[in-house]
Image (spheres, rainbow, N blue to C red):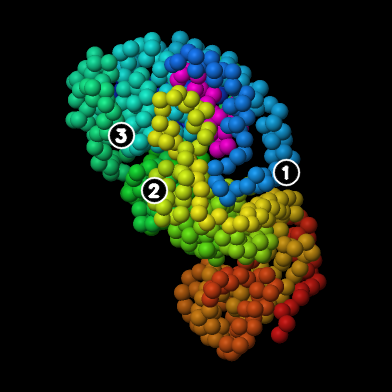
Amino acid sequence: MKLLLVNMPWGKIDFPSIQLGILKSYLARHGIDADVSYQNLIFANMIGLDLYSRLSISSRYSYLLEWLFNEFLITDPSLAREVRNTQERDIRELISLKSANPFLTEQYKPSPLGNAQAVNEQFIEDELVKVCKKIKNETIPDFFYKLLNGLSLSEYDIIGFTCSFSQTAPALSLARIIKKKYKDKVILLGGNAVSGDMGMEYLRLFPWIDYIVYGEGERALVDLVEHLRTNDDRLNGGRDRHGHDLKGILYRSGDGQVIKAPPQPLIPMDDVPLPNYDEYFSQIGAIEAATGKKLKQDTVLFETARGCWWGERVQCKFCSLNGENLHYRSKKWETAYEDLRALSRRYERNSLICVDNILRYPSFAELLSALPESKLELELFWEVKPNLTRAQLQTLAKAGVKRVQAGIENFSTDVLKLIDKGASMLKNVQFIKNSYTFDIQVSYNFLFGFPNEKPAYYDDLLTLFPLIHHLTPPLYPPKPMILQRFSRYYGQAAAHHITRIEPMSQYKRIYPMGDIDIEKIAMNFSFDCAEIPEDLDYLNRITEAIKEWNIRYGGNHRPVLAYESGAGHVKIYDSRFGRFKSILLRGLAAIIFLHCDDIKTLNSIMETAQSGGDRHDRDEEAPYAASLDAARGGGQAASQEAIQRILEQLQFKKLMIREGDRYLSLAVQLKDIQHRIPPQTMQNITQAKLYHAFEELPR
Ligand code: SF4
């Protein structure tokens, strides 16, 4: 038996599908031949690579992208005629910024960040309707026609589709076309978008789908292929008379009922093979040869773990990742190390993206320490929880981690507690400060509009943000929380005062058939909340503050807050508030400032300051120990009042922030960021040093 695994639009085109790459390898290990077809690349080339990327990168268009393919799903001719007449209305509704989050009022409409975004908005207004009609009415029929005539489908017995990234309607459509022409082909779907109730409903509604693989695909697919090899269910109209022998699939019983077989046991991570991306690169090569265009193809994906180590303990309330299975498992670090080497060697790529939910540092400390020794000059990407320490981030940087996506989500400790994020304002600031120090590019979202949040939770952030304009801001605009299937907010709605949960109205546009239960196929839901504050203007205030942060950080005069230390003193350079300032800290103030380079409790500060600089503690191990040692300079024991006064002065000067009894200095070490300082600020720093022009803290 031979399989064709298809990656449909709107799968990402900048890198291959790791799901299909792993499946291909796993099937091969079990003697099953499978090809992978990147139809997303072919389609992207038809509509234009730039347009494809712009559409598929934004979650705003996810419904629209599915809708573009829905015509092939409508079997009733009069309904098909009807929806053809409402295309323009549908497009406008699908791209409207209306949110299903009740915290967002009609007045909430974040203004564009800059010219590029404004141009994009203009593009949306003026062009998108026209472009989408052309794609729907001309390009997609042409795409399917060419696909059906170009792919030698007759050589395959089973055709499988991966469904995530707005791929479900495109996959269902192509499946229908294939089944019409090749009745004996077994058609199956797999992936996040068809798990749980969603898959059950798709299978009930679309008779041309034979099976849906739910959960992890590897074992379920091998068992299914073996089963089909020995039981020719295709003769039974795709209905599986023996489905009860299988696990991890949805199937139809003899009387047409949709049945969910028991789940497959989870696969040990060390049994997950290296993904095979051969077809991705050969298809890229073929498109380049045919068109003379160059395609981005510098990155491959790898996997070291599945599930979420935090989520299996305390799932963040809004999180829907991992569907029904959060259980965390990881590869041995040696296996992960060999995977990285093997992928880099086979595909001659240095840029590798890890697809794990979040890095569990202890599992991979040895891997990260081994990489600098390996002489592989890799550029790695990982998703991380912002609880990583300075030393851990430094290890990541040395291992070649250049970019991370961090689960920061918010800077209000009240909000972070509300959503069970296991973080705090101070920890999140420390994380972006340390990432900046080690030149690790961080991207992160700012989420708001959580059930039961209060405007007062955001007040302190308006004061905090200007103090950290020298550190990486959240992506703009901030995002309202979306209520998603599999999240705790969805599963425990009543406990969170969430009411009137309804599937997002856009699903009705994608699936206009009367007999579909939209509730079952929806991933995103609109909702109401019993406790919505009366004054929602705080959302606009916080949005403007984040916009301001982005503009200042992204501009030519990026703010700087840096320090350098000498014996018994610390020099600070500050351009965050327009006028450049240079400040000199001496003795005790310098000791306290340096001690709080990482979060410190008041007790720890007292202990260190009162030891007069002679104490040998674990700080000596810290990377800034030399600076701390230099600043201490054998000072005298200090009174509690003097220490408190200095802490207040450091906060007054906006050089330090406090949360409860914990303190954090905000400056980063000059030597770590020197090459990233704007020329004018660097000139000011040089002048301040040259003429020893510093203001001092009052004694
Ligand atoms: S949001 Fe991230 S950390 Fe939280 S449960 Fe989901 S995957 Fe885990």
- What percent of the width, then of the height, locates residue 14? 53, 33
Q: Which residue is mark 3?
A: 218
Q: Which residues are magenta?
A: 49-74
Q: Which residue is mark 2?
A: 491
- What percent of the width, then of the height, locates residue 16? 46, 32
Q: Considering only order in the chain, which callout, 3 or 1, is on the residue closer to the N terminus?
A: 1
Q: Considering only order in the chain, which callout, 3 or 2, is on the residue closer to the N terminus?
A: 3
- Confirm if mark 3 falls within 8 A of ligand 1: no
Question: Looking at the rendering, in which quadrant would you find the N terminus?
Answer: top left
Q: Quadrant of residue 536?
A: bottom right
Secondary structure character of the magenta stretch overall: helix
Residue 616 part of the magenta segment: no
The answer to whether residue 96 is above or below residue 619 is: above
**x 27%, y 23%: residue:** 256
Inter-mark Cα distance, 2 to 3? 28 Å
Mark 1 Cα shell of 10 Å, populated few (<14), some (14-19), many (≥20): few
**x 40%, y 25%: residue:** 515
Q: Which residue is mark 1?
A: 114
Q: Amino acid at mark 2?
A: Gly
Mark 2 Cα shell of 10 Å, populated few (<14), some (14-19), many (≥20): few
Tell me if I can see residue 603 in this picture.
Answer: yes
- What percent of the width, then of the height, locates residue 677? 70, 56
Number of marks in the rendered image: 3
**x 58%, y 72%: residue:** 658
Residue 70 part of the magenta segment: yes
Mark 3 Cα shell of 10 Å, populated few (<14), some (14-19), many (≥20): many
Work out whether residue 291 or residue 80 is closer to the camera in this orientation and state it. 80
Mark 3 residue element: helix
Going by the image, does 463 lie left or right of 94? Answer: right
The answer to whether residue 547 is above or below residue 635 is: above
Mark 2 residue element: helix
Q: Amino acid at mark 3?
A: Glu
